[in-house]
Amino acid sequence: MSGIYVHIPFCKHKCTYCDFTSFPNRLGFAEAYMACLYKEIEARGRELEKERFDTVYIGGGTPSVIDPKYILGLMRQIRKCFQLSNEAEVTIELNPGTVDAEKIAIYKSAGINRFSVGLQTANDALLEEIGRIHTAADFVECARLLKGENFSADIMLGLKGQTKEDVKKAIELAANEGASHISMYALTPEDGTPIYTDYLNGELPGPDEVAALYDYGMDILKEHGFMRYEVSNFCKPGFGSRHNYNYWKRGSYIGLGVSASSFFYNKRFTNTFDLDEYMKCILSGYFPVIESEEISEKDAKFEFLMLGLRTVFGVSEQAYKKEFESNWKEDFATAYQKVRPYLEESSDITRIKDEYLYVQNQILTEFLE
Ligand code: SF4
């Protein structure tokens, strides 16, 4: 299975925690950018003409901020240039402050069948504090436009002054409005973002407080019928994201657009993060790749373990053997013995015990060594 990721780097306003490649003041470049994207798709399509793709994820940025005609054109171009399966999962990220019924209708006519909505919190004061352009009421309006559709909501933990009640309110809002999937993830204050100053000033909840919010949130999610399938991802039965599964299974994916990363034919490569440079390269007939790395067998083995252990499905000894012709417990014997108390093992599958999944990073670090 292979996936396609497309990056749309425009936003109305920069959120205070945002470290993604997004440009709030350059919406006027959308037309030129999309023309370049269509060219990149054509060129990559020629290169990967024998490959079949099963998922498309249109992320950003805020893909819903640009005129939906470009998304329609984008999907046409993808279908023209790549072999996309008829049952492909096609997701678009939506910011609740930027959608209306007409846009949703156009997305659906473009074959988009999954929507990822950035709620973050249902507390309007917190939404304003972090620079989001929408309110909880905008989310409700967006969710009602998506009634009956497969949609996911993002919820963030670790915001200034955030309480358990806030977390509960956000989850219940998303669940009651029909979300089939919820991503609940902890804020990582990145150096260079405005929220980093709050972090340095000790104004954000500490790791133990965030862990308590997470545990509490998980209980509420369970009550509403969401099962955890990865540390930050929860879904109603049958609604896990196929695009994400592909990443965790070390499946191939092609990234298109500024800053997009790819993993194909055992190589990882990343496009430039500079919008002007991206367009210049494409218009000159080059791929705008700034980093490319062949994955060694040692790194591939580590990735296989790391990605598998992040999920509740764990790592299969058989699958590892099939891929590398060796046994992971022998390849990583020292680390394996060290972290065994945190693992749950059956004859083939090893997974991190439920209660330790949230602190999986500390456990996985052992395998790095
Ligand atoms: S909407 Fe998303 S991509 Fe845009 S600034 Fe906010 S967090 Fe960043």
Image (spheres, rainbow, N blue to C red):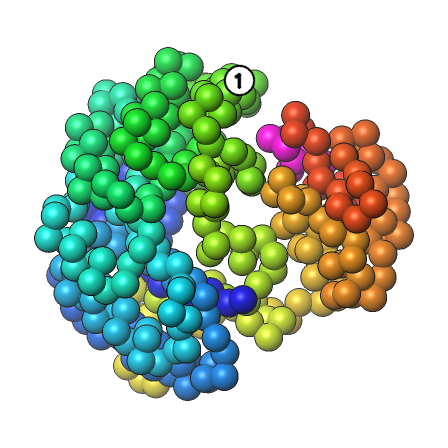
Does 254 appear above or below 348?
Answer: below
Q: Is the magenta region chiefly helix, strand or loop?
A: helix
Residue 46 among those drawn in magenta: no
Q: Give residue 79's position: percent from left, percent from top.
A: 32, 75
On the rendered structure, is 225 left or right of 160?
A: right
Residue 136 in view here: yes
Q: Give residue 118's position: percent from left, percent from top.
A: 31, 39
Q: Nearer the viewer, residue 232 or 345?
A: 345
Dividing the picture into quadrants, the one containing residue 337 is top right
Q: Nearer the viewer, residue 46 or 283?
A: 46
At x 18%, y 42%, the residue is 145
At x 53%, y 17%, the residue is 212
Q: Give residue 156's position: percent from left, percent from top.
A: 40, 31
- Where are the magenta residues, as a range? 357-363
Q: Quadrant of the N terminus?
A: bottom right
Q: At label 1, which amino acid type do we have?
A: Ala
Mark 1, Cα crowd under 10 Å, few <14 / some 14-19 / many 20+, is few
Residue 130 in view here: no
On the rendered structure, is 48 left or right of 90?
A: right
Does 221 appear above or below 314?
Answer: above
At x 50%, y 78%, the residue is 51
| Residue corresponding to mark 1 | 212
On the rendered structure, is 247 left or right of 122?
A: right
